[in-house]
Amino acid sequence: MILQDIEKKYQFEYPSLYKQLYEDGMLTVGELKENPSLLLHSYDFELLNLNSITREIERLIDPDDYRQINKEFKFIPFAKSGAGDHFCFFLNEEENGNVPIVLLCHDMSEAEYLAKNLVDFIFRTLLTDMSQQDMYNEESEEEFRGNIEKVFKSHKKYLTEQQKEVLQNLLKRDIVDYQILIGKNKEDARGFLTDIEMKKLLAEIIFFDKMDTTFEYSNE
C-alpha cells in the first residue's frame, strides 16, 4: 500500500510534510535506529505500518465498531499508543494547509487536540521526550541522551528554524532531576527541561488555542 492508494480510496490528501516523510523513508516502522524513523524512540507512540492504515481506517468508519464514531468526522490514523488510542489527522478542521493532530481515545469517546499541524506535533513530541528520561526501565543517561540526539538529527530538517534552535539549545544542557506535581502527590522525573518549562515553551512556540482540549466523537 502506498500513500496515493490510501488518498484515492478515501478521497483526501495527506499533508505535504507527511508525504515528504514517506519519500524520505521516515515512515518505515521500527527500523533505522541510527537514523531513526518518525518518532522511533518516543514514549507511548507506535507508528502504523502503511499496510495497516487502511485496516485501521475501516475499523474507525465501521458503523458496528464499538466507538460509534460520528460519520461526519474524518480521522486518518498514522500511529497508536500502547493502550490502543489513535494519533490521527483530523481532516474536518484543515485550515490553510494545517491539518490538526488529535489523539482518538478508545475508551472515553473523546478526541484530544495535540497540535495544529504535523510539524508542531513532531516538535511537541520531541520536546516532551526531552523532559522524560525513562527511569522505570533503567535507561541510562547515556542512552537517553544518545537516543534524543539521533532522533533530533534525523528530524531537524522537518522543523522550523525556531523549533530547531530551541531543541539544539536544550541538548547542550546537563540532565536535571525534578518533580512533577500530580494532584497532591509528587513524582520524580529527569530530563533536559522540567514539565513546567516544557509547557511554557509549547505555549510560546506552537500556540494553538485548542491544544489539550477535547471533543466528543461518538454518535452515542
Image (cartoon, rainbow, N blue to C red):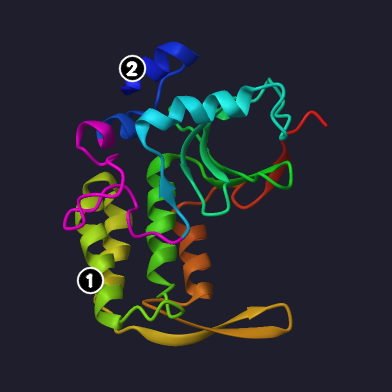
Residue 93's x, y, as percent? 58, 29
Does residue 45 appear to the left or right of 167 in the view shown?
right
* Residue type, mark 1 in image: Gly
Q: Amino acid at mark 2?
A: Gln
- Label 2 and label 1: CA atoms lie apart by 35 Å
- Whole-percent x, y for residue 148 in the image: 28, 66
The structure residue drawn at horizontal position 58% and vertical position 46%, both measured from the top left corner, is 85
Task: Say which of 152 and 172 sits in front.
Answer: 152
Q: Locate the N terminus and report the quarter of the image it occupies.
A: top left
- In primary-sequence order, the first of circles 2 and 1 is 2
* Rendered image: mark on residue 146: 1
SS for tag 1? helix
In what element is the residue under mark 2? helix
Residue reaching furthest to the right: 220
Q: Is residue 64 visible?
A: yes
152 to 58, vertically: above or below: below
Which residue is at the front of the view, 47 or 182?
A: 47
Percent coordinates x, y for residue 155 in the rendering: 25, 51
- Identified at 38% across, 50% down, the residue is 122
Q: With respect to residue 97, does 106 lie above or below?
A: below
Percent x, y for residue 177?
44, 88
Magenta stretch in the rendered image: 21-43
**Residue beneath the point at 44% across and 30% down:** 53
Circle 2 sits on which residue? 4
The residue nearer to you, when weighing 64 against 72, is 64
Q: Main secondary structure of the magenta part?
A: loop
The part of the image, by quadrant, that contains residue 126 is bottom left
- The quarter of the picture where residue 144 lies is bottom left
Left or right of 144 in this view: 91:
right
Q: Is residue 207 magenta?
A: no
